[in-house]
């Protein structure tokens, strides 16, 4: 069965520091992978997606993620965090053709000034 | 990408009553989805709504509790029936943007429901 694990419930970083949010998935075939961000009181905004091809994908707001098949991971990274990045981040896996997403439990990011 | 709006943005309701949430998209889409996000939790898919057919419900969700309408390609409603405090959640609709060429979904801003 499909599943998504985000091991870190909360992460705190200082503004300007680098960031890596972890995501591990379980899926029998090559998955479609997504990262979404949810700011307080807001809906979800798509940061980036991986369907196939280059395993390093670039997204909006300076984020990138790397698909590692051998580790079943799709970690999100940003070289320098801004205070406005404080939000909750969700990793999701989609079964191509069924359009069903499975979401991880989310990682709440706090940014220290 | 599709622009999605939801009404109401939030509501406080008494137990035993029902609330209908509207989802409007600025372009025609084939597939629309309804999710629930309970406090401090992740998103759980309630059902998939395709125009012209009955909604497909996920395990643990039933039509009598969450009836869904999809009258056209830009609009859908979700009703939360006979509410209890356990229904207090954020309800989000999303659409699959087939024009983007892949299985990516775009989400509305959500409806925050509190049941007292």
Image (cartoon, rainbow, N blue to C red):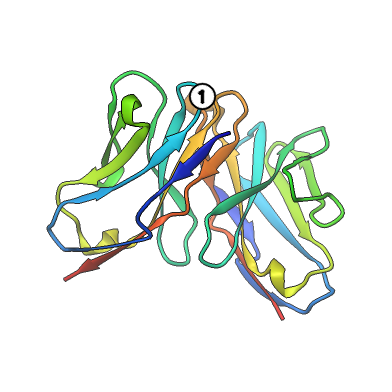
- At 28% from the left edge and 21% from the top edge, which residue is drawn? A54
Percent of width and height locating residue B75: 70, 45
Out of A97 and A73, give the one closest to the viewer: A73
Q: Left or right: where does residue A84 sit relative to residue B96?
A: left
State the image quarter where residue A16 is shown: bottom left
Out of B40 and B73, give the one closest to the viewer: B40
Which chain does tag 1 point to?
A
Q: Left or right: where does residue A39 sit relative to residue A95?
A: left
Q: Is residue B95 above or below residue A68?
A: below
Q: Left or right: where does residue A30 sit relative to residue A73?
A: right
- At 47% from the left edge and 52% from the top edge, which residue is drawn? A44
**Quadrant in which the C terminus of chain A appears:** bottom left
Q: Is residue B26 visible?
A: no
Out of A56 and B27, give the one closest to the viewer: A56
* Label tally: 1
Residue closest to the far right: B64
Percent of width and height locating residue B65: 82, 57
Percent of width and height locating residue A21: 30, 49
State the image quarter where residue A76 is shown: top left
Which residue is disc 1 drawn over? A28
- At 52% from the left edge and 55% from the top edge, which residue is drawn? B42
Q: Is residue A33 visible?
A: yes
Q: Left or right: where does residue A10 sit relative to residue B98?
A: left
Q: How many other residues sit within 10 Å of disc 1, few (<14), some (14-19) or many (≥20)? A: few
Residue closest to the far left: A16
The local secondary structure at tag 1 comes to loop
């Amino acid at each position: 069965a499909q599943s998504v694990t985000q091991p870190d419930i909360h992460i705190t970083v200082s503004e300007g520091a680098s960031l890596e949010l972890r995501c591990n998935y379980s899926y029998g075939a090559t998955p479609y992978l997504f990262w979404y961000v949810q700011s307080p009181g807001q809906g979800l905004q798509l940061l980036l997606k991986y369907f196939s091809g280059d395993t390093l994908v670039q997204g909006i707001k300076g984020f990138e993620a790397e698909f590692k098949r051998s580790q079943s991971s799709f970690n999100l990274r940003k070289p320098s965090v801004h205070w406005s990045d404080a939000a909750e981040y969700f990793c999701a896996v989609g079964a191509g053709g069924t359009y069903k997403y499975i979401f991880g439990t989310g990682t709440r990011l706090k940014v220290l000034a | 990408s599709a622009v999605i709006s939801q009404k109401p943005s939030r509501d406080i309701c008494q137990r035993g009553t029902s609330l209908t949430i509207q989802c409007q998209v600025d372009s025609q889409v084939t597939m629309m989805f309804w999710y629930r996000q309970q406090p401090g939790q992740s998103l759980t898919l309630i059902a998939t709504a395709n125009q012209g057919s009955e909604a497909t419900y996920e395990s643990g969700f039933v039509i009598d509790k969450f009836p869904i309408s999809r009258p056209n390609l830009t609009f859908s409603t979700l009703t939360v029936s006979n509410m209890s405090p356990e229904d207090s959640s954020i309800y989000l609709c999303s659409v699959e943007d087939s024009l983007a060429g892949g299985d990516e979904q775009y989400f509305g801003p959500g409806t925050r429901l509190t049941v007292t």
